[in-house]
């Protein structure tokens, strides 16, 4: 039932409210003083040495895509696992080609060196 | 509940009231995706829309789909889009209009399409809510049974499609 | 219970937004976002019809299709964004108005 999610809703409201208060109150009450050092992006105390908006290396995209493919696999593994006990061999046989095909994709990306960072 | 012009509006139940909030959030975020000038704001609004759709799935008692939605769309696809924006450096656009020269025609078309769908959704006598759904392991198990019996072909073909997508995307995006 | 038509209206709105985004935006990534919106709207419809159909506990067609569409959308996003990145590397732009090599 959707009403089972009432605690979750309350939690979301509380979390959002906390965020709004934690950001809103200092802006409302705190003193405002702007100088160059304060407006710099905060990098754990280190002085920023380059623009944050430079182009990212494409390797991030390749890793993210690998994550996406295996995310989909998990989505299918979950209902499959719930029914494996009833269907046994049949469900296992149905999953094997799916699994092999995705592992082949993973091996391809590995072989092509998309996972090497340098 | 009686509105000024004599329009009768039924008082929503609590569930309907919460649904209206979720639907409004989803709709506003969806609109922000297409009208925001900054591409990165669009991506953030898109993430919010995905969350809202997951909430709608909860109302439809499709819990497994709600979790899948958060896992795949919010966790992976939104991140992929954000990476693509950073990779193409297009978030600093801003200098020209984000719309092409057929935006007038498209907005009219989309609006008429919306009106048409709305009229259809309101005019058709839809059946009331279906039977009671017990959303537990049995439902997920039944879904798994569908995938290895009725939809086994679609399931294997999807695996093949994911392989092709992976290989194709690696070939296209890799630095040479 | 929330009536079926409410879900359909929300889906219609999201679909129209996505349609407008896919047709009117100049940036290729923004067009892709419009397509994702449309896929989500279609998914809402599928699940809503599953819930309000005959015997949602026995006939899971709507949910099965929705899961398959999620997988499909993932593949589409992966390839589409890779294409956009490849085009950007070649042409230094992803403005679809400037990518007119094939238009006569």
Image (spheres, coloured by chain):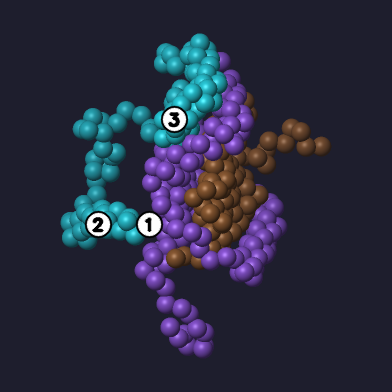
Q: Which mark identifies residue A14?
A: 2
Residues at discs 3 and 2 both on one chain: yes
Callout 3: chain:
A
Q: Residue at x 51, y 11 (%)?
A: A111
Does residue B99 show up?
A: no
Q: Going by the picture, which residue comes out furthest to the right?
A: C104
Chain (cyan): A
- Report the residue marked by disc 3: A84
Q: Going by the picture, which residue comes out furthest to the top?
A: A111
Where is residue B26? Give x, y as percent: 46, 56
- Report the residue marked by disc 1: A1
Q: Residue at x 37, y 57 (%)?
A: A1
Q: Nearer the viewer, mark 3 or mark 2?
A: 3
> Taking B5 as reference, is C45 above or below it?
above
How many residues crowd around disc 1 within 10 Å: few (fewer than 14), some, or many (20 or more)?
some
Chain (brown): C
């Amino acid at each position: 039932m959707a009403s089972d999610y009432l605690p979750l809703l309350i939690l979301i409201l509380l979390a959002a409210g906390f965020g709004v208060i934690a950001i809103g109150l200092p802006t409302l009450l705190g003193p405002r003083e702007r100088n160059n050092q304060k407006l710099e992006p905060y990098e754990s105390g280190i002085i920023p040495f380059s623009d944050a908006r430079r182009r990212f290396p494409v390797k991030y995209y390749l890793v993210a895509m690998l994550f996406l493919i295996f995310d989909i696999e998990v989505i299918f593994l979950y209902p499959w696992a719930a029914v494996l006990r009833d269907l046994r061999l049949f469900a296992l046989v149905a999953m094997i080609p799916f699994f092999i095909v995705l592992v082949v994709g993973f091996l391809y990306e590995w072989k092509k060196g998309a996972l090497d960072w340098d | 509940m009686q509105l000024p012009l004599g329009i009768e509006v039924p008082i929503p139940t609590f569930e309907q009231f919460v649904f209206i909030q979720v639907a409004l959030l989803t709709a506003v975020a969806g609109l922000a995706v297409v009208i925001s000038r900054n591409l990165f704001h669009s991506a953030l609004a898109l993430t919010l829309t995905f969350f809202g759709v997951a909430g709608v799935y909860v109302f439809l008692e499709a819990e497994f789909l709600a979790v899948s939605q958060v896992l795949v769309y919010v966790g992976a696809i939104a991140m992929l889009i954000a990476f693509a924006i950073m990779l193409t450096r297009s978030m600093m656009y801003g200098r020209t209009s984000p719309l092409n020269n057929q935006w007038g025609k498209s907005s009219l078309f989309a609006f008429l399409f919306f009106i048409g769908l709305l009229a259809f959704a309101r005019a058709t006598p839809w059946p009331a809510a279906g039977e009671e759904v017990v959303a537990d392991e049995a439902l997920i198990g039944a879904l798994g049974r569908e995938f290895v019996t009725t939809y086994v072909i679609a399931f294997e073909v999807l695996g093949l499609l994911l392989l092709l997508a992976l290989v194709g995307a690696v070939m296209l995006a890799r630095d040479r | 219970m929330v009536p079926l038509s409410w879900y359909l209206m929300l889906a219609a709105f999201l679909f129209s937004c996505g349609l407008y985004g896919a047709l009117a935006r100049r940036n290729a990534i923004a067009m892709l976002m419009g397509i994702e919106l449309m896929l989500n709207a279609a998914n809402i419809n599928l699940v809503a019809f599953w819930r309000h159909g005959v015997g949602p506990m026995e006939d899971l067609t709507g949910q099965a299709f929705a899961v398959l569409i999620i997988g499909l959308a993932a593949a589409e996003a992966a390839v589409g964004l890779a294409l956009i990145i490849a085009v950007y590397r070649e042409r230094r732009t992803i403005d679809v108005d400037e990518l007119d090599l094939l238009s006569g």
